[in-house]
Amino acid sequence: MINVGIFGASGRMGQAVIQALVNDNEASLSAAIVRKNSSSYGKSATENEPVHFISADELQPEEIDVLIDFSLPEALTENLKLAEQYQLPIVVCTTGLNEEQKERLAQAAETVAVLYASNTSVGIALLEQLVGISSAALPNADIEIFEAHHRHKKDGPSGTALSLGQAAAKGRQQSWEQVNDGIRSDGLRSDEGIGFSVMRAADIIGEHQVTLAVAGERIEIGHRVSNRKTFADGALRAAKWLEEQAPGLYSLQDTLNLQDILQRMLKQ
Ligand SMILES: NC(=O)C1=CN([C@@H]2O[C@H](COP(=O)(O)OP(=O)(O)OC[C@H]3O[C@@H](n4cnc5c(N)ncnc54)[C@H](OP(=O)(O)O)[C@@H]3O)[C@@H](O)[C@H]2O)C=CC1
Ligand SMILES: O=C(O)C1=N[C@H](C(=O)O)C[C@H](O)C1
């Protein structure tokens, strides 16, 4: 049985992971971590099991095998410090990271196993591969990315949308910094630019669509999540994989054999 500690345990995703752990035969909840001033602090985190919301300074590292971070970017540095201090692998799922925070991930990965996933669903991992192949196969297509999320989301474009843009740029061997047009506020596109449109409404859980358009036709590749359990199951799957890995910076792609499958299909 793998013992899991969750940062951001009181949030939408933290709650979804706790719920997924209730039905998991291979992993169990050992720490539900919130801020000390959280309204959840000290309350029971689960219905039937004796796990309470605790603060990071109350962690019992010997009771934890792997950490999952579903808090917010502001907490990343502190969370990585704890992973390093206790030598625990950590799956980081927060989005909206700045450059400094991304570098901090790489730094932590020198001493502990770190998996960063802006989206833990297997469907998005596949979509990334399909977008890379499509953008390489249609080098002149205009690429635009649309994403929609719930009204409480704090970052945009979503981490997933940015990862899809990077997959498209990689497919064409382009520098992401050069082709990233960001959110198209002025409605104008550059020749090779990849632009984003963002919707925030009600309780939409997560939708992404990549459009590749040439004159006369367009391809639209999309993905919709209708239940946070999809992300929670994916994070747990990644955590179980990461628990056995040496220090290093990993992605969800490392846990799947999608590239092998696609290469086999492309050869046929
Ligand atoms: N990788 C993936 O597949 C997915 C990633 N996400 C990302 O996960 C993150 C969390 O999303 P979601 O659960 O919807 O967000 P929520 O706002 O619901 O939860 C975040 C939790 O983090 C805690 N928190 C807030 N601010 C801080 C802080 N400064 N320091 C430490 N803890 C803090 C809060 O708990 P408290 O106040 O109780 O301490 C809060 O409940 C986002 O970055 C989101 O984009 C979301 C879905 C899927
Ligand atoms: O905040 C969310 O909810 C989500 N965030 C992630 C992102 O920014 O890509 C993943 C998912 O789409 C839900």
Image: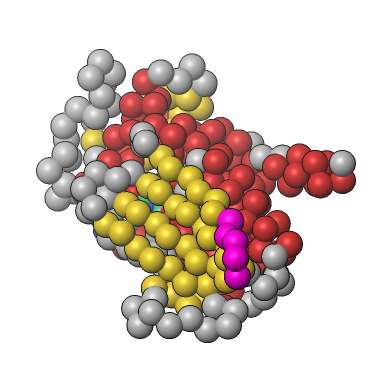
* Image: magenta residue range: 215-219
Q: Position of residue 2 (x, y in %)?
A: 51, 27
Q: Is residue 59 visible?
A: no
**Does the magenta-highlighted stretch encompass residue 198?**
no
Question: In the rendered view, does 93 fall on the left or right side of 240?
Answer: left
Q: Position of residue 208 (x, y in %)?
A: 45, 52
Q: Residue at x 23, y 19 (%)?
A: 47
Question: In the rendered view, does 256 fall on the left or right side of 203?
Answer: right
Q: How many marks?
A: 0
Q: Position of residue 3 (x, y in %)?
A: 46, 29
Q: Position of residue 231 (x, y in %)?
A: 43, 39
Q: Depth check: 133 or 7 in front?
A: 133
Q: Residue at x 40, y 49 (%)?
A: 207
Magenta stretch: dominant secondary structure? strand
Q: Residue at x 67, y 58 (%)?
A: 134
Q: Residue at x 37, y 20 (%)?
A: 22
Q: Residue furthest right?
A: 267
Placement of 179 over or under 69, stated as above or below: below
Q: Depth check: 235 or 145 in front?
A: 145
Placement of 249 over or under 261, stated as above or below: below
Question: In the rendered view, does 191 fall on the left or right side of 98?
Answer: right
Quarter the C terminus occupies: top right
